[in-house]
Amino acid sequence: MEAIVTDSLSGSDPARGSIAVRPARSRQPFARLPTTASGNKLVARWDSDSFPSGTYEFSATGYDAAGNATSSERRANG
């Protein structure tokens, strides 16, 4: 999966960020997935076979060049 990181003021930090997963509608903390940050894109692979059957939600956290972080659980299409 991919997440695009943008910051029009200071620019995105191309070396930092993460994508994480947890069971949907749970209060469990998100578990980070191995994530590669390159340019303005975060890329992670999720091996769904290693997780119990069910519905999951994902969170992407990106950083700007100033070190500020923001996270989103929204998909690009809503």
Image (cartoon, rainbow, N blue to C red):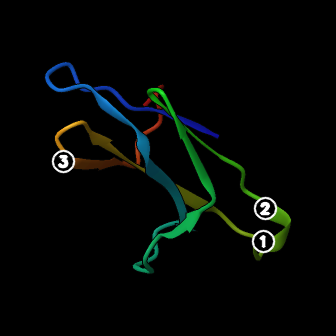
Label disc, if present, on residue 68 of the rendered structure: 3
Amino acid type, label 2: Ser
Decide which of 32, 23 is in the foreground and name it.
32
Q: Quadrant of residue 11?
A: top left
**Which element carries disc 2, helix, strand or loop?**
helix
> Which residue, as the protein is rendered here, is positioned at the far bottom?
28
**Which element carries disc 3, helix, strand or loop?**
loop
In front of the other: label 2 or label 1? 2
Circle 1: is it few (<14), some (14-19), or many (20+) Cα within 10 Å? few
> In this figure, what is the number of numbered marks?
3
Quadrant of the image for the C terminus? top left
- Residue at numbered disc 1: 53
Quadrant of the image for the N terminus? top right
* Picture residue at 43% right of the left edge, 77% below the top: 29
Q: Earlier in the sequence, mark 3 or mark 1?
A: 1
For the residues marked 3 and 1, what is the alpha-carbon distance in whole angstroms?
Answer: 35 Å
* Picture residue at 64% right of the left edge, 63% below the top: 55
Decide which of 10, 59 is in the foreground and name it.
10
Q: Is residue 22 above or below residue 66?
A: below
